[in-house]
Image (cartoon, grey):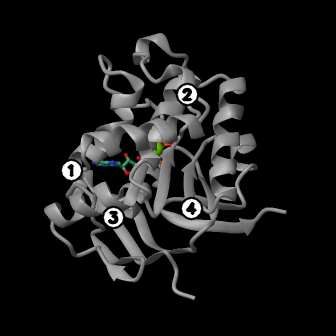
């Protein structure tokens, strides 16, 4: 079977000479459609660097990355941006919502970039907000929402373009345990519906909800196991 994500011998080196940091060191990783993967590892082990490369936010220093069979590691900035917009959903620790913008407009944003018409944008944004349990908060500003609700808006935004895969970097890092629980339940539901999710987390308990746990240390995978 062709993997959705196929990263081969990926290295990422930042800086030069005395500033040289090997963030990823010949890492190999394959993820199939429909997986729910947690990536764990100590601070500085290369988790975010890996997500940036897999999410086409950055390119490896060496190695090959195939996304759905297509070699993307040698593409230029514009082509990478197009892949990001059309095929990848991101969720970040800090939510990254536009502050003076209602939930529904925040969720519509990726569709504006991909030139979907207003009427369809609204319909799709509303459906996604309903899917994350926020049909009563369509017109709320981020400042009027709880942390967990803001993160749910961010998840709806990540989903609205029907991406191939969702990457989440510490999605529960700014949330209390109850809100974290809600976010994980949403990811589990989305995964049951067939979506592919790759989630970075520091928290053992959060990682334990995924179906596969990959541990990274010094830019290499040191363990990779299926749960249950
Ligand atoms: N833009 C950059 N320039 C230089 N070095 C960087 C850059 N980004 C990351 N690094 C270095 O690469 C290594 C891996 O960083 P990365 O952010 O991937 O770690 P992480 O596992 O996500 O850590 P954390 O759990 O703290 O978020 C670290 O040593 C870091 O200092
Ligand atoms: Mg990080």
- Residue 143 appears in which quarter of the rendering? top left
Q: Earlier in the sequence, mark 2 or mark 3?
A: 3
- Return the residue nearer the eye: 216 or 18: 216
Residue 204 versus residue 180 in the image, above or below = below
Q: Which residue corresponds to the image point at 38% horizontal and 53% vertical from the top-left?
A: 161
What secondary structure is marked by label 1? loop
**Circles 4 and 2 in contact, beta carbons < 8 Å:** no
Within-10-Å neighbours for mark 1: few <14, some 14–19, many 20+: few
Q: State which tag comes first along the sequence, 3 or 1.
A: 3
Mark 4 vs mark 2: which is more N-terminal? 2
**Identity of the residue furthest to the right in this view:** 228
Residue 33 in which image quadrant: bottom right
Q: Quickly name the residue at label 3.
A: 12
Check whether the beta carbons of the residues at disc 4 and disc 1 lie within 8 A of each other.
no
Relative height, residue 207 to residue 154 (above, below) = below
Marks 2 and 1 close (CB-CB < 8 Å): no
Q: Quadrant of residue 123?
A: top left
Query: Which residue is found at the position 49% from the left and 75% from the top?
Result: 4
Q: Residues within 10 Å of mark 4 (few under 14, many from 20)?
A: many
Tell me where residue 108 appears, x and y as whole percent: 33, 38
Residue 80 point in image, percent of width and height: 23, 63
């Amino acid at each position: 079977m062709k993997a959705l994500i196929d990263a081969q011998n990926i290295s990422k080196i930042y800086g030069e000479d005395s500033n040289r940091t090997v963030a990823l060191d010949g890492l190999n990783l394959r993820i199939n459609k429909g997986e729910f993967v947690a990536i764990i590892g100590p601070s500085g082990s290369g988790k975010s660097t890996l997500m940036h490369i897999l999410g086409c936010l950055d390119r490896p220093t060496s190695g090959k990355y195939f996304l759905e069979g297509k070699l993307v590691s040698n593409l230029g900035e514009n082509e990478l941006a197009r892949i990001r917009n059309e095929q990848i959903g991101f969720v970040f620790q800090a939510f990254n919502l536009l502050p003076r913008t209602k939930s529904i407009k925040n969720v519509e944003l990726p569709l504006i970039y991909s030139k979907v018409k207003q009427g369809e944008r609204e319909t799709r944004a509303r459906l996604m907000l309903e899917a994350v349990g926020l049909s009563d908060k369509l017109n709320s500003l981020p400042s009027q929402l709880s942390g967990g609700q803001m993160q749910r808006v961010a998840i709806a935004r990540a989903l609205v373009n029907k991406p191939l895969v969702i990457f989440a970097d510490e999605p529960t890092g700014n949330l209390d345990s109850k809100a974290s629980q809600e976010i994980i339940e949403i990811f589990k539901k989305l995964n049951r519906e067939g979506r592919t999710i790759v989630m970075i987390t520091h928290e053992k308990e959060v990682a334990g909800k995924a179906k596969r746990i990959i541990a990274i240390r010094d830019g290499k995978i040191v363990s990779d196991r299926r749960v249950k």
